[in-house]
Image: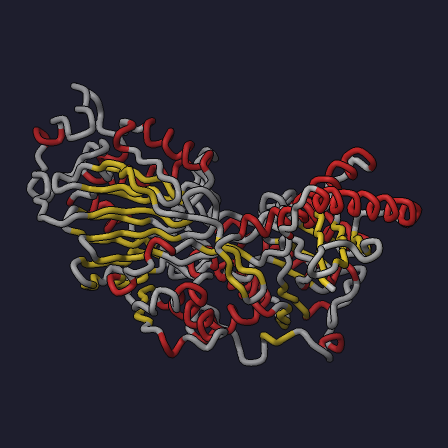
Amino acid sequence: MTPEQSSQPQAGGTAQKEGQKPGFFQRFTGKSGQPGSQPNAQGNQPKQSAGKVRVYPLGGFEQVGRNCFVVEVDEDIYIIDLGLQFPDEDMLGIDYLIPDISSLKGRENKIKAILFTHGHLDHIGAVQHLLPALRFPPCYGTRLTMAMVNKRLEEDHLNSKVQLHTVNFRERVRIGKIEVEFLRVTHSIPDSAAIVLHTPAGVIIHTGDFKFDLTPMNEDPADFHRLAELGNQGVLAIIADSTNAQKPGNSKSEREISQTLRGLIREAKGRVIVSTFSSLLNRIAQVIEHAKEVDRKIFISGRSMETNIEIAQQLGYIKTPRGMIRKAGPGMEKIPDSEVLILTTGSQGEEQAGLARMGLGIHRNVVVKKGDTVILSSNPIMGNERAVAKVVNNLHLKGAHVKTNAELALHTTGHGYQNDILLMHRLVRAKYIIPEHGEPHMKAAHADLARSIGYPDNQIQLLLNGEILEFDNESNARKSKQKFPANDVIIDGRGAAGEGQRILNDRKVMSNGGAIVVVFRAYAESKRLVGDPDILSRGLIYGSELQSISKEVAETSRKAYEEQLARGETDRKAIKSAVIGALYRYFDRKLDREPMVIPIIVEV
């Protein structure tokens, strides 16, 4: 592009002011860096060919987790990620939530591919639940990512039914009507990728989870050059990570965290216990390298930690001498404390995880003692602060030295801060920005960042789960009036249910007010009662109240039942509703409590 061309206004942008010095971005790429600018190598707008393109999220646009984004080209469907969301504190008993794919029902044969950005569970964790329902379309991803997907499917004996394709970085793969390209980005797990879709309407980039770490550990930096090259050629839209859009500056480098960990491990006199997310393989690899330097044997506690380290070793991402890494078990106490490092799960205070059990003194193989150094290489996720504090207190009571990120640099995020996000947009210069991966306040902060570099509101598309953005042949975007369902689909044990909210509401009622069951015995024909109803309560009536309250509940229930019968009502549902209403009023007046009331009518 000539200097004369670079001073001209671009679509959606503004001209460079006369006499203004070129900034960093212009010096770096030779472009003005204004939003909406899409020149090709000759400085012209890229030619568009026919092809209807629309995009929509089925998860990940109103929460952190449950990531699932759909791109449709004509009738071909491409899905990016099938992730899970861990439950909030008030989602009692729920294992996790997965995307609602009901909008794809009846169109399964149109799905050309599932594309995975990286191997974290919020991006791959729903595969064993959703791939069968989607009729096992082919899956594509980088080497470690596909190994993690395969392991997830293997647990449910599904891996033989799926075509898993490993793709190299920068390799362009033809899938249906488009070409797909995987570009290296930096995150907290190796082989993380941004996915580039070369569609008839233009290039669409999905960043996945990313930050720009100039000094990453155990892997190469992000592919700045290819991102800038795509920006020069013209990018229609970018779907970009919003998680840390409210945090100014740049995210810390993993190298800084590595140096802190190295110092603590070298200085420790007794055993070292390190707790982190089992999916932070870059961090785990650092800990293992530092343990190797000081001749410490590594013992693993936690199934997910064992599984992920095993996969990373098989693929060569973690390299250790034979016998250095072992499963925690009997006999480890025979090794001198100064030669032991234990890697464990439980950095979020999970009750059943290794670290919490160590703090309570109920771990099968590890008894925390005075002189141990415990390192929590993580930050508490919002809502987990109290659980983490409880574990830390228990460890202190056992005599351990506990080190957390509150006092030392022991954790850094895998998601970029404001400057990382701005750099991504300066490199790519997409016509449209679609903030993703985050709660509404995170995406709103991302939108503000886009405005700060000149994007007008009509080029920033804030979507909710299920909302559809359509691109016409002129590469203009508009939000469709149609909206797909994106309900909470819960995984509870081995079951999946789309009516999750009703179940959660019932559990909240029981957790707050307990439950009471009223059993009526009635004649089958006349519906008249036989004796008084039986009362069974849980979590509602204290022992001192039991006799008097149970008697009053029985009387109130019987009265409500017989009043309905006197009015000629024989419908079981109507009689039960009357009993529930009467008992609600009773408990509100008498005890100021709101239990779940379950009337049962047994005909004799």
Report the side of 422 relative to 280 (left or right): left
For the point 71% across and 46% down, the residue is: 565
Give the quarter of the image for residue 140: bottom left
For the point 16% across and 48% down, the residue is: 52
Estimate the x, y position of residue 35 in percent, counting from the top left: 23, 33
Estimate the x, y position of residue 283 in percent, counting from the top left: 52, 58
Q: Quadrant of the C terminus?
A: bottom right
Estimate the x, y position of residue 404 in percent, counting from the top left: 65, 48
Q: Quadrant of the N terminus?
A: top left
Q: Farthest residue toward the top? A: 18
For the point 38% across and 65% down, the residue is: 133
The one nearer the camera, 569 or 164, is 569
The one nearer the camera, 601 or 204, is 601
Estimate the x, y position of residue 579 in percent, counting from the top left: 72, 45
Would residue 367 be seen by someone viewing this image from the given angle?
yes
Question: In the figure, 538 relative to 248: above or below?
Answer: below
For the point 32% across and 46% down, the residue is: 56
Question: In the figure, 506 relative to 29: above or below?
Answer: below
Would residue 512 be seen by someone viewing this image from the given angle?
no
Give the quarter of the image for residue 474: top left
Report the side of 84 relative to 484 (left or right): right
The one nearer the camera, 412 or 590, is 590
